[in-house]
Image (cartoon, rainbow, N blue to C red):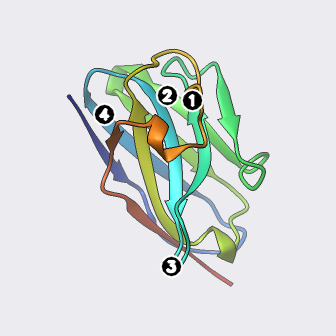
């Protein structure tokens, strides 16, 4: 069993940065980040094997967001730079129990992931 707890969300101006954290208890698995804006479906943001060496990003995240892993703290980070108002959403981390060190086989699919955190709100003002 895995428990995931996100933190680090908040209110930031456009162009600013935030770093989200996803603390994992129990076993460690490949991690995905998703987000859901009001009135929209949840969408994929980024994914990583637990080693952090292999990553995969959505087009909207590429070049602005970065996944990193702190093994000592069992925590995954999502560094978000150059934030835009359209990045406003609840951000979730999720774990794929079928994969540890590589990016999940279908990283953009919610059904690939078995465990989900409760989400953290990110609001970007214009």
Which residue is at a point 65% across and 21% down the rendered structure image? Answer: 54
Quarter of the image for residue 40 reads bottom right
Q: Is residue 15 left or right of residue 70?
A: right
Which residue lies at the image location 59% right of the left edge and 25% below the top edge? 105
Q: Position of residue 124 (x, y in %)?
A: 60, 75
Q: Name the residue rendered at 45%, 17% in the picture.
A: 100
Nearer to us: label 4 or label 3? 3
The one nearer the camera, 99 or 74, is 99
Disc 3 designates what residue?
38
**Label disc, if present, on residue 48 of the rendered structure:** 1
Label 3 neighbourhood size at 10 Å, few (<14), some (14-19), many (20+)? few
**x and y percentages locating residue 5 in the rendered image:** 29, 46
Label 2: which residue? 69
Residue 24 numbered tag: 4
Picture coordinates of residue 69, whole percent (x, y):
49, 28
Does residue 123 sit above or below 52 in this rendering? below
Residue at x 60%, y 33% (from the top left corner): 106
Q: CA distance from mark 1 to mark 4?
A: 14 Å
In the image, which is nearer the foreground, mark 1 or mark 2?
Answer: 1
Q: How far, Cα to Cα, is label 4 from label 3? A: 26 Å
Q: Earlier in the sequence, mark 1 or mark 4?
A: 4
Tell me if label 1 and label 2 are in contact, CB under 8 Å. yes
> CB atoms at circles 1 and 4 under 8 Å apart?
no
């Amino acid at each position: 069993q895995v428990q995931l707890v996100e933190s680090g969300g908040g209110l930031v101006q456009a162009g600013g940065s935030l770093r989200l954290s996803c603390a994992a208890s129990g076993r460690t698995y490949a991690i995905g980040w998703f987000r859901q804006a009001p009135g929209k479906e949840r969408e994929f943001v980024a994914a990583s094997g637990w080693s952090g060496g292999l990553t995969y990003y959505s087009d909207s995240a590429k070049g602005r967001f970065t996944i990193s892993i702190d093994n000592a703290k069992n925590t995954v980070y999502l560094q978000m730079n150059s934030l835009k108002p359209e990045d406003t959403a609840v951000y979730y981390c999720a774990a794929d129990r079928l994969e540890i060190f590589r990016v999940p086989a279908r990283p953009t699919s919610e059904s690939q992931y078995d465990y989900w955190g409760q989400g953290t709100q990110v609001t970007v003002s214009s």
